[in-house]
Image (cartoon, rainbow, N blue to C red):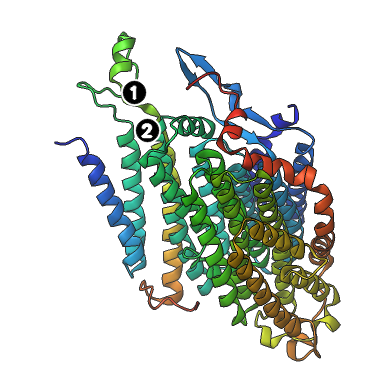
Amino acid sequence: MGVNNLLPLFVAVPLALGFVMPVLGRIKRERILDVLAILGALFLFGLTVLLFRGGDGVYWMGNWKPTLVEGKTLLGICLVSDGLTRLLLLVVNVVTFLVIIFSSGYMSRYTSRGLYYSLFFLMVAGMNGVVLTGDFFNLYVFLEIASIASYALVAFGCESEELEASFKYLVLGAIGTLLVLVGVALLYGLTGTLNMGQVAQILGNAGKMARPAYLALCLFLAGFGIKAAMVPFHAWLPDAHPSAPAPISAMLSGVLIKAIGVYALCRVVFNVFGATTPGVAQVLVAMGIISMVAGAFLMIGQWDLKRLLAYSSISHMGYVVLAVGVAAGVLARGGPSGLAALAIFGGLFHLLNHATFKSLLFLASGAIEHAIGTRDLKKMSGLSKTMPVTSGCTRVASLAIAGVPPFNGFFSKLIIVIAVVWAGHYWLAAVTVLVSFVTLVTFVKVQRCIVQGEPTGSAADAREAPASMTLPMVVLAVICVVAGVLALFFRADLFNPAEDAMIGQSSGYVSRFELPGQP
Amino acid sequence: MPAYLPYLLCMVLLAIGIYGMVAKKNVIKIIIGLAITEYAINMFLVLLGWRGGPKPLAPILAPGQAEQQFLANAVDPLPQALVLTSIVVGLSVLALAVALAVRLYQKYGTFDITEIRKLRG
C-alpha cells in the first residue's frame, strides 16, 4: 500500500513541470530545459516501475476516506491503481520518456522550446490523470487538460495547414468532451454521486438500467469514440496527427488516443456500467470493425507518409476496440471468462504494441523530414544508404505493424484472431485477417519507397539524424522485436491484473473502494 | 410552469449550440456555437442541483439559521462547484479557439471554412 501513496505525483510532477518550463524558457539556455524535461520524464518512468511492486489500491486525496455518516457514505476525491491503470501508465510514461529524448534533438528547428515542453507536460499530466482518476468530474477535467494541450500542440508550428487542422480538431474534440460532460451530469442527477465506484454500485444494485443511464452510456460511447477516433467520429485525426511536429504526432497516435479514448471507454463500459447488455458489445464490435476496414482502405492510396500513418492508427484502434467488444459480448452472454480474458489480452497487447511501433514510425518520419525536408513518399528513396539507422528502424516497425512474425504485431493480431474465432464470429475473423493483409501491402509500399532503391535528389545528401533522435528509435525498435515473445512470458505480471480488472466488471471495481455499507 | 420546462429549454439551447458548431460555415459562428453549447451544459448542471421546495436557499449557512431548515431547503452546492470548474475549462477552450481564428484569418484572409481547405481527406 505504501507505493500507492505516490499516486498523486503522476499528475503533480508533470503539472509542476508544465508551469516551470515557460518561466525557465526566459533564460536563453535551452539545454537546461532539455535536461529538466528528460529528468522529469525519467522520474515518471521510474515511478511507474515502482508502482508495479505495489498491489491494487486507492489513494484518497487529503485522507478523506469513505465514512458512514447517518446512513450515508461520504467520501473525497480518489486516485485508483489497478492492473489496467498500471498497464496504461507504463505505456504512457515509457513513450513519453523516449519522445522527450527525441524532442531534445528534433525541436531545434522550432522556437520557444519552453512553451513546447510546457504543453507537452500538461498533456502528460492530463493523460496520467485520466488513467488514474476514480471520480467522474476529474475524468472530465483531466480529459480537457490533455485535449486542450494537444489542440495547441497540433498548431505549434503556426503554418496555415497546422492551424486549419488544429481548429478542426478543437471543434470536434470540444463536442466530444461536452458530450462526456452531459453524460457525467446525467449520472450525477441519477445517482447523486460522482465517485465512479459509488456510481457503479448504485447502477449495479438497481439491476435493470434506468433510461437516463442508457442515455449517459450512449453519450460516453460517442464522446470517447470521438477521442479514440473511431469511424464515424474519425474526421479530425488524419488532419491533426500529421500536422503536429513529429514527436507530438508520436504522442498523439502512440498514447493520447489510447489513454483518453480507448482506456476511458473500457473503464466506463466494463467497470462502471458493467458489460451486461449485449447491445453495448455489438456497438463496440461494430465501431471496431468499421474503423479497422475504413482506416485500412483509406490508408492504401496515401502518399504523404504521416497521413498514411494516421489512417493506419484509426485501423489499429479498430483492432483494439473489436477485441474489447468481443470480450464484452462474451461476458454479457455469460460465456467462459477465459475467452473474455484472451480477447482482452489480445486487445491490450495490441494497444501496447501499437504504442511502440506507431510512435517509432512517427519518430522515423520526423527524422526523415528533418534530413530531406519532405514527407512525400515519392520523393524519398534509398535511405538505407544514407540513413542506415533510421531506415533500419523503419523496416523493423513496418514489419511489426504489418504483422510479420516474430515481431510483436504478429502475436497480438494472432491472439485477437484466435479469440474472435473462439467466440464464434467467423466472418469478423476473416475481415480481421483481410485488413491485416491490406496493412502488409501498404507497408511493403512504404518500404519500397523509403528503404530500397538508389538515393536521388535531396535523399542523396541526407545525413543520419543525431544520436538524441536515433537512440529512442533504436530502443523502440528493440522493444518491437522482443516484446512479442517476452509478453507471452510476462502475461502473468503485466496483463493478467489488467484482464482481471476488466473481467471483474463493476462488482470487482466497487470492491476496490472499500465503501462501508450501502450509499 | 411545468417542472420540466427549464430542462427542455436547456436541451433546446444545447441543440442550437451543436447545430451552430456542425452546420455553420463561418469560423466565428462555429465558436459562438461552442460557447452556446457550453452555457447550455452549465445551465443543465445548475438545474440538477435544484431540489424544489417552497423556499429554496442558496447553499450558504447564515449565522443563527436552523440547520434542519437549511438542509431541507438549500439547493445542492456540488453542481455549482462543478459549474465553476467547467466555466474555467470552457473559457480556456474558447480562448484557444479565438486565438486560432485570429491566426487563421491572418493566413487565409477569410473566416469561411469552405475556403480554408488546404488539407484534403
Say whether residue A103 is visible: no
A213 or B6, which is in the foreground? A213
Query: Disc 1 residue type?
Result: Pro
* Marks 1/2: CA–CA distance: 9 Å
Badge 1 sits on which subunit? Answer: B
The mark tally for this picture is 2
Classify A83 as above or below B20: above
Classify B75 as above or below A103: above
Q: Which residue is drawn at 84% across and 54% down?
A: A486
User: Local crowd at mark 2 within 10 Å, few (<14), some, or many (≥20)?
Assistant: some
User: Dot 2 corresponds to which residue?
Assistant: B80
Classify A192 as above or below A35: above
Query: Disc 2 residue type?
Result: Gln
> Where does residue A163 sit, x and y in percent of width and height?
50, 68
Helix, strand or loop at label 1? It is loop
Badge 2 sits on which subunit? Answer: B
A103 or A172, which is in the foreground? A172
User: Dot 1 corresponds to which residue?
Assistant: B59
